[in-house]
Amino acid sequence: MGYALGGKPALIKNYMQEFDPLFPNSRQGWHKRQMRDHCREAYERFGLLSLPEFYRLLSPLLLNRVKPLPDGMDELAALDEEKLENESFSKRLITGAAAEGFFESSFAKIADFTGHILTNVTRFGCGFDYRLQPANSRPFLAVEVKGIAAASGEIMMTSKEYQVAEYLGNRYFLCVVRNFTEKPVISLFQNPLDQGLGFIHRERQQTSLTWHAKIPA
């Protein structure tokens, strides 16, 4: 959650411990000290909300930090409100945003990217999340970031991401941030289509309904 919101995970943990004494759980939290005023105010305003109500209140804050829909990715296009409230869908969005935040905070420590300038290009729909420009005149590197909550799991590349990876070859890196439930670690794959990951093509057709209206003069 900390990485997804662009903050420090330790800060989120501190707030968790602040509220632990007020909710039934196995943790004691900071039960021996008085709650801070702004936390008490937040509890009085929102503490009685149900989880679905609280989710609807918070989801715009998280969804606004998730990268927009890139070209060729229609997975989110036909989702209705019921599916948006699905727990697994929410976790995937949060994990993806967290993975990007973790990569931004860690990329300078990766040997392949030493001396590169990082630019976030998620909003341009160019088939990768980050452009890394070396200090000299060498071509830029492209990095696509994926997140997995567990130590292993499945990742998905869109048609656009796959095509760009195929075109750029060794200049394209797939960065998988995994094991968020324990301690996040980075697995880096240069030219991922040539790394034996066994990508499988899946095709799905969807019907999208739109509503049109004429605005009078």
Image (tube, rainbow, N blue to C red):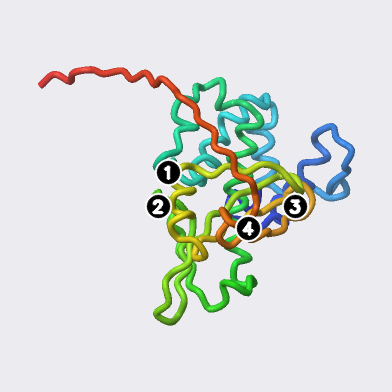
Displayed quadrant of residue 208: top left
Q: Which quadrant would residue 22 be assigned to in this image?
A: top right
Measure how far apart labels 1 and 4 are at the Cα level: 21 Å
Q: Earlier in the sequence, mark 2 or mark 4?
A: 4
Residue 157 vs 205, above or below: the answer is: below
Q: Residue furthest left?
A: 217
Which residue lies at the image location 49% right of the left edge and 61% below the top edge?
A: 169
- The residue depicted at 62 percent of the width and 52 percent of the height is 99
Residue under numbered circle 1: 70
Q: Amino acid at mark 1?
A: Pro
Image position of 128 (left or right of 3): left
Helix, strand or loop status at disc 3:
helix
Q: Nearer the viewer, mark 3 or mark 2?
A: 2
Pointer 3 residue: 14
Considering depth in this image, is 80 or 26 the residue closer to the camera?
80
Mark closer to the chain start, 4 or 3: 3
Q: Quadrant of the C terminus?
A: top left
Q: Residues within 10 Å of mark 4 (few under 14, many from 20)?
A: many
Dot 2, how many residues are within 10 Å of its Cα: few (below 14), some (14-19), or many (20+)? some
In the image, what residue type sits under mark 4? Phe
Residue under label 2, please give it.
Answer: 126
Q: Does label 2 or label 1 sit earlier along the sequence?
A: 1
The image position of residue 15, as x and y in percent, is 72, 48
